[in-house]
Image (spheres, rainbow, N blue to C red):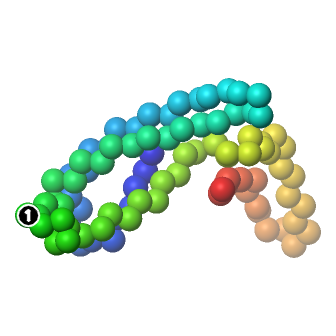
């Protein structure tokens, strides 16, 4: 798992994740749970704590289960293209 921060100082972040697979009659279901430890986010009042924005990526995984097994790029101009797929769901 990777993360990005938009702050100048990068604080120590501890992330524990767990991905569970559940199968049922309709298909597959995955549950991603994460625990974030942010020592820099403290405050006496709940209203004074800044919100946390989370964006995550799971490499080589799509919720639909679709996979690209073969990719062919035809480029007539001579440009050397690299076959690379990025799954975004």
Which percent across, then down, holds residue 17?
Answer: 40, 38
Drawn side of residue 15 relative to residue 72, left or right:
left
Which percent across, then down, holds residue 62?
Answer: 67, 46
Which percent across, then down, holds residue 12?
Answer: 21, 52
Which percent across, then down, holds residue 27?
Answer: 75, 33
Q: Quadrant of the C terminus?
A: bottom right
Few, some or many C-alpha atoms within 10 Å of disc 1 (few <14, some 14-19, many ≥20)?
A: few
The front one of 13 and 18 is: 18
Drawn side of residue 70 relative to residue 24, left or right:
right
Q: Quadrant of the N terminus?
A: top left
Residue drawn at point x = 87 percent, y = 52 percent: 72
Q: Quadrant of residue 5?
A: bottom left
| Disc 1 target residue | 44
Q: Is residue 20 above or below residue 59?
A: above
The front one of 30 and 39 is: 30
Residue drawn at point x = 34 percent, y = 38 percent: 16
């Amino acid at each position: 798992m990777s993360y990005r921060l938009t702050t100048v100082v990068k604080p120590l972040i501890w992330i524990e994740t767990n991905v569970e697979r559940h199968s049922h009659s309709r298909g597959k279901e995955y549950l991603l749970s994460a625990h974030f430890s942010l020592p820099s986010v403290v405050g006496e009042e709940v209203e004074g704590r800044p919100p946390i924005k989370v964006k995550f990526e799971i490499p080589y995984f799509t919720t639909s289960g679709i996979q690209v097994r073969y990719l062919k790029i035809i480029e007539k101009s001579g440009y050397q293209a690299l076959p690379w797929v990025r799954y975004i769901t």
